[in-house]
Image (cartoon, grey):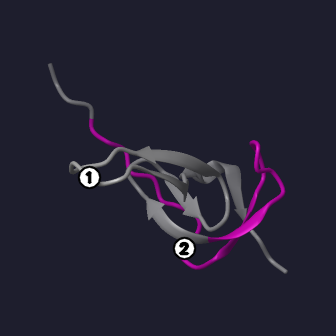
Amino acid sequence: MKKKAMLQLKVHVKIGEKVKVISGKEKGKIGLVKKILKQKNRLIIEGINIGVKHIKPSRPGQNGEIKRIEFPIHSSNVSLYQE
């Protein structure tokens, strides 16, 4: 059985550019691109798609945490924002 070749698509925005979310639960919001995940064709945008991550304690005596982090959204759900 052959492995499927991963298709890397060109992302239409760059890090630091302002984008507007055009679909999904965050529709209409504006933010800056922090990171691009090219293999999955997704973006991490500052202040958009914030979720909760529960972190278990790694050592005895250490406390667990609940962190709020920005999760990636698909690049097709954003457009370049021009003021």
Q: Residue furthest front?
A: 61
Q: Residue furthest top?
A: 1
Nearest the camera: 56 or 39?
56
Query: Which portion, as a residue range, is magenta?
Result: 5-32
Which of label 2 and label 1 is nearer to you?
1
What's the CA distance linking mark 2 and mark 1? Answer: 42 Å
Task: Say which residue appears at 17% left-offset and 25% top-offset.
Answer: 2
Residue 5, position as x, y percentages in the image = 27, 38
User: In what element is the residue under mark 2?
Assistant: loop
Residue 1, position as x, y percentages in the image = 14, 18
Q: Amino acid at mark 1?
A: Gly
Confirm whether the magenta stretch covers residue 7: yes
- As drawn, the label of residue 20 is none
Nearest the camera: 15 or 52?
52
Residue 6, position as x, y percentages in the image = 31, 42
Question: Which quadrant: the C terminus?
Answer: bottom right
- As drawn, the label of residue 14 is 2
Comes first in the chain, label 2 or label 1:
2
Q: Residue furthest left?
A: 1
User: In what element is the residue under mark 1?
Assistant: loop
Q: Is residue 54 left or right of residue 7?
A: right
Q: Is residue 62 left or right of residue 50?
A: left
Residue 74, position as x, y percentages in the image = 58, 48
Instruction: Identify the residue under disc 1.
Output: 61
Answer with the quarter of the image where residue 48 lies: bottom right
Q: Amino acid at mark 2?
A: Lys
Q: Is residue 61 left or right of residue 64?
A: left
